[in-house]
Amino acid sequence: MKKEEVVAQIINEVGGKENINNVWHCMTRLRFDLKDKTKVNQEAIQSLEGILGSQFNKDQFQIVIGTTVDKYYDIIVNILGSNINKNSTEKDKNSQSKDKKSLSTRFMDTVSGVFGPIVPAIAGAGMIKGLIAGLVALKFISGNTDTLKVIDMIASGVFTFLPFFLAVSAAKKFKTNEYLAVAIAATIMYPTMVDAAKAGKITAFYVLGILPIPVFNYSSSVIPIIFAVWVLSYVHKLIDKYMPDTMRTVFTPTLTLFISGFLTLGVTGPIGIYLGRGLAWVITALFSISPILAGVIVGAIRPIAILTGMHHAMTPIALQNFATQGYDMLMPMMFMTNISITGAAAAIYFKENTKQGKTIVISSVISGLFGITEPALFGVLTKYKKAFFAATIGSTVASAFISSFGVRLYGYVLSSVFSIPAYIGPYFVYAMLGILIALSVSFALSYLFVVKMDKKDSTSSKNNEIASVMTGDVKDITEAPDQTFAQKLLGDGFVVFPSAGKVVAPFDGTITMIYKTKHAIALTSSNGIEVLIHIGLDTVTLNGEGFALLVKEGDTVKRGQTILNVDLALMKLKGMQMATPVIVTNLNERVLKLKKIGNVEAGETVVDIK
């Protein structure tokens, strides 16, 4: 399926163009602000080719794609055209008011919306800075050559002039003029301000000898420009609203820039500087109380933050630390988390028993080593929750270890194996030991929790058995009244002609999918056997009527446990054919042997898998 086709399906399954307020992306995810979340068909989206997963995080809908997400985003922008962002303006009275969103939701929307698009720039520049630092530390190159100065210009420019990048991204997020936003960034970055701050001889300029304009070095700053553009968006809207049409072209930008410029220099800029310093102080205080405690907290919350898409909240803190302290201790812990996730996913290679499963693990591990952990998280660890727990433990232990020795970075780098040279220096040994701890602990625990324990369980023959899901007459799948099942197009199995309405789990395992009309349920056994239960043949037309569901997706169930009750009397009244196929969808090289046919009780063994 072509990307254009996938994107068209995505737009359709999120409720169409008219349901999209806004869409943006980070390194691996498409992020949607939707009017009506109930219109999203999450199951259909997750079944699309190239989609690793999807989830709601507060009021934000996220689709995990991977490192090619920008290509999908470009296609979406081309399709939506001028509709993008326009749907969320005040003119749309039917849209969901953003004021109703919680403070935390708005904060996360802002952080991900502003920082997500510029991550490639700061990650690329940070990687170059890390490699240069490593080569200089190893004395492979001199720190005073013209060559190094040129390369440093390429790498350091992004961070020195970070307010410009943030201005453009924030303008898109706050839906205001991008060029006016850049003009505000140019105002605070003008040499008069920067040079005065570096000289340290004055603390303020005085307009008309009365109004003080505090002097600060805004280079590499984060919070001031975001605040400034936010204020700019309101100033611009207010002026534009009351400005006559004939004067709007000239006087709207003039007044907007003049007023916003003064507000930025005199109010929002200084407030942003002090907030940034306060944020840095809080982090420093946490480390001063106990570096180990700081490592435990960051290491423990980082995996779930990545899973929920909230990890961007740490990016401005790290950048602020670089700007105010010259170094940061959070990014090394982010590196430990990435390695832990990669290690936990790598252990699952020994759990997967299909070529496709092993291929997914290998590709996710490679992506994880390169700093992109979403494929490992959504493609592997969400399937094996104990492995995710192992990754969290590995992240916590390794982060606490390196934090106790004060491991830090002096420049932003992407948390991947390519960033290792950036650690060369007094903390290099501890950083390498941290990587070893993260990898070994997560791998060992994941192997123990998922692979070893399941292998032990699989010594019992029950793990290779499938029980009848209902009481009734069991027949070979070839006798199913529907040719799709009878011809084994979906897989091999058996069919039950029920005499009672209780539906039970065919083995110990997990509920992996429940169709919205409740007539079809997918389960995965503890040793990887995937089964689809299709209760009745045309029961989808009832839209759930007559089905009483007792479980939900993600639940762990035991063999013989009732998962659904069916009103067979109602089904008969409705004229439904209640033949219930039970299909093994991932048989692959394994052999299915039907051990019993005829009348059976729910929970009684009918199939053996070899």
Image: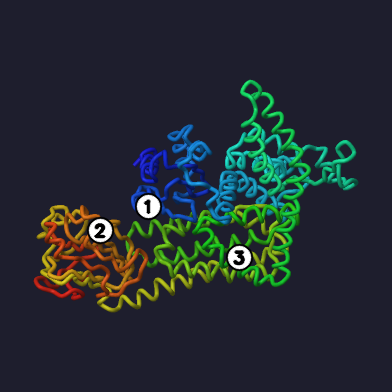
The disc placed on residue 42 is 1
Q: Nearer the viewer, residue 606 or 109?
A: 109
The disc placed on residue 397 is none
The disc placed on residue 298 is 3
Q: Distance from label 1 to label 3 (Cα)?
A: 31 Å
Q: Is residue 173 rendered to the left or right of residue 565?
A: right
**Residue 50 point in image, percent of width and height:** 39, 48
Q: Earlier along the polypeptide chain: callout 2 or callout 3? A: 3
Kindly indicate the quadrant of the structure image that contains residue 436: bottom right
Res. 75 in view: yes
Q: Assign the C terminus to one quadrant of the image.
A: bottom left
**Secondary element type, mark 1:** helix
Instruction: Report the residue at 10% width, 69% height from top.
Output: 473
Q: Is residue 139 above or below residue 239?
A: below
Q: Is residue 397 rendered to the left or right of residue 565?
A: right
**Residue 20 point in image, percent of width and height:** 45, 42
Instruction: Report the residue at 15% width, 75% height from top.
Output: 601
- For badge 3, the amino acid type reads Val
Kindly indicate the quadrant of the structure image that contains residue 503: bottom left
Q: Is residue 164 above or below residue 385?
A: above
**Secondary element type, mark 2:** loop
The disc placed on residue 544 is 2
Q: Residues within 10 Å of mark 3 (few under 14, many from 20)?
A: many
Q: Is residue 2 above or below residue 299?
A: above
**Residue 458 point in image, percent of width and height:** 31, 75
Q: Assign the N terminus to one quadrant of the image.
A: top left
- For badge 2, the amino acid type reads Gly
Which label lies toward us, 2 or 1? 2
